[in-house]
Image: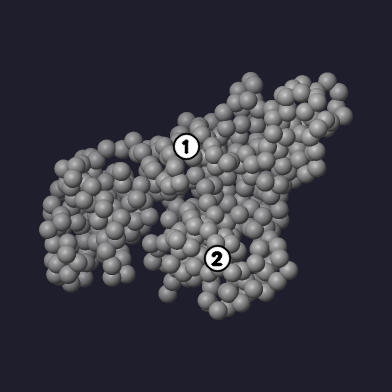
């Protein structure tokens, strides 16, 4: 039986990525909750609104009623302040809240607390007060509590500084260099399962709308990730941001105990942060299959991916991949027709129980494939793929075991159903 997951607020950047990452899962069923009407209403099939703001007096009581009424199993907060708040009330709510401990969430929500903890271990921005002598401009002002580049200000001279109210703000050195996000995942044993760096090439309202993964940057910043992970008890996905100073040295800006909005680039490579967080929450350590290519993502209110991988043959599964819950997976069909339009070969490879051709006829898919390979339950897909030939091929299957076998035996790119959309152009 699927675990019911309540996402709040579901229309946030993270809430929408959770939907994209988990909505096709056979293990979890998503429910969306928002305090105000937002885009979540147009995305989540199970959508709930009308609850007050999370810091209103009766919020927890209202939330407990929603949890009981809908038989929710897991609560998935999507914003930094909401994570800390709901972690504080986790025991009273009676269900697990996705994320690390309340103490870790509080540290991550404050840059000052982060700097106090890590300042003697890695490079942090130099901090100043208005009364410091020999201030060298420009300086930079940012909120202690907040994320991205929201509510920040470059201070160019002493007059501007005098007229700036620093209540709740940090006055620090100005860092003129490039900015990077390093996405990470820590398992239940405290071990780092994944580190992936990317440049924040273009940002809008604090959100990276153009970003690109980089194996070179990942190795450059790996030591930062390991130091942070050894000093903060993370659980699941988290990230930190670095910026280069005038000498080209990396400086820590902030850490966060959730996945970043633009981390979807890693989902295409095989790192589904949202789904992995849910497995971790129910006591299952995830295992990652990381495709060896870099990706650039550019967003204009939606995701578009450019993969540096070429292919002319597609091996694709049937049950729970093309047909999900008795319905045709439209992403899969769109991709198949895209491939056929580009003269690529599409081969159905399945262990379907029953007559596969009758099932294809039932769903009007009978003439869709260049070839259909129907295997017995004990036969290996890798063997059949080897016999046909897998040069310049990719493999799509909902089954982790099938993807792992193909990945390990044939070393070709593998994709789950959550990544099919990344292949659409």
Between 118 and 340, which is closer to the camera in this rendering? 340
Image point 80% across, 26% down: which residue? 159
Give the residue at mark 2: 33
SS at badge 1: strand
Q: Is residue 18 above or below residue 424?
A: below
Q: Which mark is residue 297?
A: none
Q: Is residue 353 visible?
A: yes
Local packing at callout 1 (Cα closer than 10 Å; few below 14, some 14-19, many 20+) is: many
The scheme the figure's colours follow is one colour
Location of the N terminus by quadrant is: bottom left
Please state if 258 lies on the left or on the right of 130 as rendered: left
Q: Is residue 203 above or below residue 278?
A: above
Image location (x, y in percent) of residue 406: 29, 50
Image location (x, y in percent) of residue 220: 54, 31
Image point 44% across, 42% down: which residue? 299
Between 195 and 328, which is closer to the camera in this rendering? 328
Q: Quadrant of residue 131?
A: top right
Image location (x, y in percent) of residue 88: 70, 63
Image point 85% across, 27% down: which residue? 132
Give the residue at mark 1: 210
């Amino acid at each position: 039986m699927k675990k019911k997951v309540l996402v709040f607020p579901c229309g946030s950047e993270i809430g929408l990525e959770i939907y994209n990452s988990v909505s096709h899962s056979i293990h979890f069923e998503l429910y969306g909750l928002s305090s105000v009407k937002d885009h979540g209403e147009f995305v989540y099939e199970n959508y709930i609104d009308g609850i007050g703001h999370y810091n209103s007096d009766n919020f927890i009581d209202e939330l407990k009623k929603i949890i009981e009424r809908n038989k929710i199993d897991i609560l998935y907060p999507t914003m930094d302040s909401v994570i800390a708040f709901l972690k504080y009330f986790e025991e009273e709510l009676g269900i697990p809240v996705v994320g690390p401990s309340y103490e870790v969430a509080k540290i991550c929500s404050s840059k000052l607390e982060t700097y106090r903890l890590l300042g003697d271990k890695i490079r942090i921005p130099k901090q100043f007060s208005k009364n410091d002598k020999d201030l060298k401009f420009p300086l930079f002002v940012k909120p202690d509590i907040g994320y991205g580049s929201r509510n920040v200000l470059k201070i160019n001279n002493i007059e501007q500084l005098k007229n700036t109210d620093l209540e709740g703000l940090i006055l620090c050195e100005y860092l003129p260099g490039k900015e990077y996000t390093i996405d990470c995942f820590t398992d239940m044993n405290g071990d780092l399962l994944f580190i992936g760096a990317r440049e924040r090439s273009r940002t809008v309202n604090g959100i990276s709308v153009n970003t690109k993964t980089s194996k070179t940057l990942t190795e450059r910043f790996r030591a930062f990730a390991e130091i942070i992970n050894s000093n903060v008890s993370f659980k699941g996905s988290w990230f930190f941001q670095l910026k280069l100073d005038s000498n080209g040295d990396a400086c820590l800006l902030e850490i966060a105990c959730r996945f970043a909005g633009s981390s979807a680039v890693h989902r295409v490579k095989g790192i589904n942060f949202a789904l992995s967080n849910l497995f971790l929450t129910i006591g299952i350590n995830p295992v990652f299959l990381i495709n060896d290519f870099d990706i650039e993502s550019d967003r204009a209110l939606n995701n578009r991916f450019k993969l540096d991988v070429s292919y002319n043959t597609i091996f694709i599964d049937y049950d729970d991949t093309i047909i999900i819950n008795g319905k045709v997976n439209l992403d899969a069909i769109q991709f198949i027709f895209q491939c056929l339009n580009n003269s690529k070969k599409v081969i159905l490879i399945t262990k379907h129980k029953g007559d596969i051709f009758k099932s294809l006829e039932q769903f009007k898919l009978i003439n869709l494939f260049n070839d259909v390979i129907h295997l017995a339950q004990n036969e290996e897909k890798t063997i059949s793929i080897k016999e046909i030939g897998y040069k310049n091929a990719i493999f799509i299957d909902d089954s982790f075991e099938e993807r792992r076998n193909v990945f390990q035996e044939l070393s070709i790119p593998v994709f789950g159903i959550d990544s099919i959309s990344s292949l659409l152009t």
